[in-house]
Amino acid sequence: MRRGLMGWNPDELPKAALEARIARLRTAMARGGFDAVLLYTNLTRPSAAAWLTGFTPYWSDGLMLIALQGAPVLATALSKRVGNWMRTTDTLSEIVNTPKPGALVGKRLADAGCRRVGVLEYDSLPAGLHDEIAGAAPGIELVDLGGTFAAVRRVVDDAERGLIGRADGLACAALDEIDVESASDAGDVAGLVEKSARLGGAEEAYIAVAPDLDADRRMIRVAGSMPLGRRFAVRASVAYKGCWVRRIRSFARDDTAQRAFAEADAWLADAAASLSPGSPLEAQLSAGLSQLPGAGLHNMMSESCIGSYPLEPVADAPAGGYVVMTVALMLAGTPWLGAVPAFVGR
Amino acid sequence: MTEGDVSVFGDRSARLLREMAGEGIDVLLLYGNAWQNDYLRYATDFGILEGQGLAVVREDGVTLFLDSALEAARAERECTGVEIVHAPDLLDRVDKALSRLSNRRIGTAPARLIPRKLAARARDLNMSDRTGFLDRLLMGKLASEVDAVRRACKVADEGYEVFMKAARRGRADYELIAETEAFFRSRGVDDNFQIIGVGGPEVRGMAPPGGRRLKPGDMVTTELTPCVDGYYAQICRTLVVGEPSTEQRQAFALYREAMEAGIAAVRDGVTAADIARAENEVFRRAGLGDYVTDEYTRVRGHGVGLFADTKPHILEDVTTRIDEGMTLIVHPNTYHPVVGYLVLGDVVAVTKDGCEVFTGTPRELFGVPG
């Protein structure tokens, strides 16, 4: 549940940027033969609606309706008493508070004479909302939006680059708080990192720890006091005004591993900065491992924001596209984890 | 997972299978995400943060399908006794798993959130809505679950103390929450629901922090809801930056009377409506009946447990029977026309003849140095 800083700042996210994004989507909609588009939003799947209007629900869920003309319509079960708050994050949409968002949206679609409506991630649309829409607009064809939204979404504008940069600054500063010599408890470290991110204005911060890399490289949300091993890793997934980054830093108390970790950090930073558009990202990074002697790949993941999830796996990225690369290596028998955000081809 | 957590989960799992057998349910399909996780958590003990999850609960075991690789890796470490499957193609994988079980009686919960693609196969897969069945289990808790809520309330009290110490003139609302979250992480609290209000009569409710800085005279309202071993406990309190004014104290006295009237009404056999009415009559007698309507307030309390806000909702039109073993928060939070939005709420566990109050923080309108 969101409890970090939320709110629209026109300097950070100009209205013109949001309007341009909606315009690009509408061009794609017209080309695809869609009379309207529906985007589901909740705090786990906020990113499509947030990209277009700035709105993220801290609670409950909603449906955003984008027609070929007119203001976006956000129908939400959030109470009208939080209407003022909603307007501090979304100044573009017509906001309608209703216990049945699907029914309201269905009626709007029917009244507008819409025939073919694209639904982002249609298969995942909650059944209750689907049934409300279908009940209110039985003659309308609901189809999956397919790649239409992703193609538009992958263009990263200056506003988004700025917000991602801000989120990354928070994540890096938060991880900088860790003093490897004095850090002894995973819970304390998680608290320190999260506090730093939130004091900096993070909208959200999910901190995970692999307390002892030599024993288990999988990361956990620490529940209770847990001692840190000789080598450990911390992942900071941080959001700033709807834009997410991940950073993983591995720490070692012995000089040999510290040197190896520093080399791996530098390698990943260079490799991510050198990614080329249009070809598989993981293959590019794997090929670059030859620059890090002794390193063996355990696994790798490339993520971006192309739909309603803040980050989801992607195979490649266009020029200027945003990705987060997460890598697990073995460095002469020592596990190392790293994650960095990058803009491809920049 | 702590020892206490393991034994509560064990109790829940045994109960779930017993009750499924009693209801003629062979298999349960449970959905969860970070916003609505209680149904999923009941059967898996996993606090999902990213992505979506679907659990298939059978007599011979539970399989948890997660579409996030990071969450699947985390679940492998954090969940014992549950098969974890990383399923990037979540719906297809679960559809296949259910297809292998389609000669069984499959219940789903919560029905509203089951993904459309799976719900559309209800007839083919012999699936039916069993949200009410899970709601009953979520509301009526085992003794070990009530103990878990009691433990969570202690942490909520401690968290509020940290929040109060952080509340000083000039600090931003999100900084107070940052301090509280840091405390919670260090105490092993893996999730928290918290909203905040800062200001005076212009404040109509609480929301996520928006960057308001505390100034003398401001009322700072918050409800914080730490999750301890899977169980959420909430506390609602109001503080004033500086010395509370006479008007603020008079308003607060009314809220305290309302909350205590609500708590006095709690016992096995009453309804949610009875509790709400007891709170609201205090406001009506004071000529503030308008402020107990949905124009100004959402609910007069609610259940707490595996989710921050569960059934029953405490409202005058909710006739849900209150049973021994439920855990509720009674909170007459609403707008006051003179001083603004005010909150006060304590968690109670329902007993045969009344209730046990778990919240220990004094029922005061606190003043912090301004």
Image (tube, coloured by chain):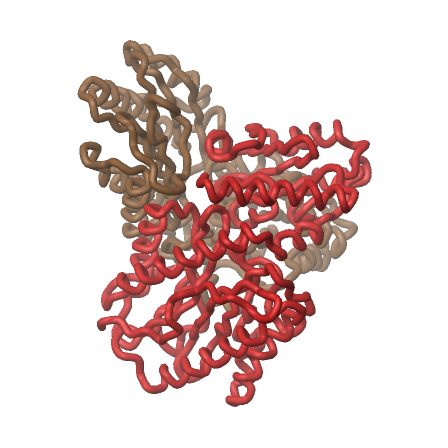
Above or below, B82 relative to B32: above
Q: Is residue A237 left or right of residue A24?
A: left
On the image, the x and y values in percent for residue A304 come to 45, 33
Q: Quadrant of residue A25?
A: top right
Residue lying furthest front in this view? B353
**Left or right: A102 with respect to B287?**
right
Q: Residue at x 53, y 42 (%)?
A: B7
Give percent across and percent down for residue A102: 67, 55
Q: In the figure, the brown chain has which letter?
A: A
- Residue A63 seen from this side: no
The residue closer to the viewer here, B300 or A325, is B300
Chain for colour red? B
Where is residue B79? Give x, y as percent: 51, 34
In which quadrant will I find the C terminus of chain B? bottom left
Placement of the N terminus of chain B among the 4 image quadrants: top left
* Residue B81, picture quadrant: top right
The residue closer to the viewer here, A183 or A137, is: A183
Looking at the rendered structure, the number of numbered marks drawn on it comes to 0
Residue B205, image quadrant: bottom left
* Residue A164 percent coordinates (x, y): 35, 41
Tell me: A212 left or right of B142: left
| Residue ID at (64%, 49%) | A36
Residue B9 in sight in this render: yes
* Residue at position x 39%, y 24% in the image: A216
Vertical side of B364 occupied by A78: above or below: above
Q: Is residue B107 left or right of residue A47?
A: right
Q: B93 above or below B2?
A: above
Q: In the rendered view, would you say B245 is above or below A319? A: below
